[in-house]
Amino acid sequence: MDQKKRTYSAAKLVGRVIQYMLRYYKYLFLLVVLCILITAVCTVVGATFPQTLVDDYITPMLKTGSRDFTGLAADLRQLACIMGLGVITAFTYNRIMVNVSQGTMRRLRDDLFRRMEALPIKYFDTHAHGDIMSVYTNDVDTLRQLLSQSIPQIINSLISMAATLVTMIILNPALTVISILTAVVMLMVTTNFSKLSGKYYVRQQIDLGAVDGFIEEMLDGQKVVKVFCHEQAAMEDFHKVNEKLRDSANKANRYANLLMPINANIGWISYALVAIVGAILGINGLAGVTIGTVVTFVGLNKSFTNPITQVSQQINFVVNAAAGAQRVFDLMDQEPEEDEGYVELVYAKEDENGTLTESPVRTNLWAWKHPHKAEGTVTYRKLEGGVVFDDVDFGYTDEKIVLHNISLWAKPGQKIAFVGATGAGKTTITNLINRFYDIADGKIRYDDININKIKKPDLRRSLGIVLQDTHLFTGTVMENIRYGKLDATDEDCINAAKLANADGFIRRLPDGYDTMLTGDGANLSQGQRQLLAIARAAVADPPALILDEATSSIDTRTEKLVQAGMDALMKGRTTFVIAHRLSTVKNSDCIMVMEQGRIIERGTHDQLIEQKGKYYQLYTGNFA
């Protein structure tokens, strides 16, 4: 499956972020815009008051010597009310945007995690886990600044500029031209510098993900690093990826940090030009310019150019957020795992005639509910665990096939073992049974049903899996066992632990079954972790089992205890076993010997020993 990775312009990415926000907070955002509009109008009213103050009060008082401040006091009270309203609306929209931005990010993380859980295993096999983590942390965090500050600030600046421009044109069109020309220069500078910094912000986010991925890899492999005294080499490797991040961040901020000072100085030039030209016009009595007009216009000019400077400052955050949004939406746009299945696994009950019907409550019987659309009927088939591979080919890529003409059958309750050298394709076969990957050719049938017709969650629910690489979650021992069956009672979990011979060591833990596990079970031995994984599979009580080197990390003494539990667990269940310890598969109903993606021998232990082929060599160690 081809994964999507598209490149969008910064404007489209920011637009998509805004659309995402509006999906949940449209009315609150409209209220924010209204508050910003009121704030901008209040600001403009305050900026025009100097003209009233100079032309209507100060100049007449200087001419007449009047000391009557009644009118001025009334205007000041009115101005105070207007400015107070502006302060209230500014506080309101900032407070609302905090809630909107945090709520949007929460929903975004929820949607990201939901999409991640729907992705196929192939995606995680081909992407560094630290890089994926960086999307949730660094890249999503870039959107926080965008939503809470940059977008409101840009909207506020644009509305303020528009209101100020209208006021300037009404007040004096001639002086307005100077402000517009300098504003055009500032916008050109902003556009060009944003393009220069934008590409490096994208590079910065990628390099940041690489640093996070490297750190996670070193944390996971810290024991290996120390065993091989690789600390110095690890530090040197980290310095290289860290230097790449420094370089891209330096170039991104080099252009971004120049933008605001340049625009600020252009703004001061505009301020000076308006003051000089206004003074000349006012002294000569031209264009109807008064002292009050010049004083007010200088303030309005600053109100007109300041927003551009503020926008240029926010552009840095916008470009950085666009780079983060690119990576966020790359993950969001990944194609989810395809599932065209329609056969479901349901609770069932069986009458005296052997007829199966669906049960609304849990029973000890499961059945495949198979709708037949053409006939408009539904049939039920008992879940037994029979598996058939019919001439199956598979490759992780279309160019390289790793399994060739695999044909095998496992009757319900049989134990099928796969042996062979590392890389022969043993684990790949089990990954095909639970449809972590889909086959290139051939068919796989489960209880005589093509597994492509079975819904993937239902298929996987019917399989108990114990992987070679055990993973335990943060939580108690009881919670980790219950992971195999979320509605299992404490008694069910304890019985499963006893079956796996894990009960003894669990009860010796400080808090028994309530002992908290952290760091992937770092406070347990590798063998103990493996026993918990076996107990987790046992509590699910599945009709079919996949054991991928399930006893690989258990010592010989513990293996004998576990093997007894495993035999009890496998009784009556179809079981696929992958093992390097051939002693654990001697009692298998059929042993498949694999080499380079092909089954080269098959039979019972005794039959294969008699053939004196590859299995005989593996078992006896006689490779002569």
Image: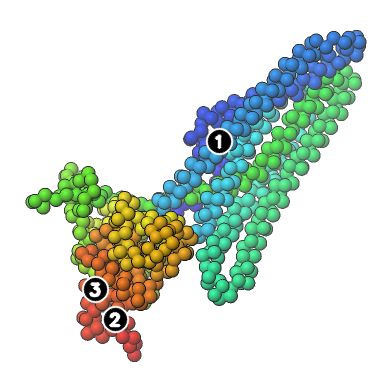
**Percent position of residue 465, x then y:** 33, 62
Q: Which amino acid does the dot numbered 3 rest on?
A: Ser
Residue 437 quadrant: bottom left
| Residue 284: quarter of image | top right
Quadrant for residue 546, please give it: bottom left
Query: What is the tally of numbered marks visible in this picture?
Result: 3
Q: Which mark is on residue 99?
A: 1
Q: Position of residue 217 (x, y in %)?
A: 53, 64
Is residue 186 something that shows in the picture? Answer: yes
Residue at screen point 74% across, 16% down:
77
Determine whether label 1 and label 2 are within 8 Å by CB: no
Res 212 label: none
Q: Is residue 369 left or right of residue 210?
A: left
The residue drawn where x is 16% and y is 49% is 349
Residue at figure coordinates x 53%, y 58% from the top left? 130
Q: Earlier in the sequence, mark 1 or mark 3?
A: 1
Q: Amino acid at mark 1?
A: Asn
Residue bearing the label numbered 3: 588
Query: Which type of secondary structure does the marked residue at label 3 adopt?
Result: loop
Which residue matches tag 2? 615
Mark 1 lies on a secondary structure that is helix
Side of 116 where 283 appears, left or right: right
Q: What secondary structure is marked by label 2?
A: helix
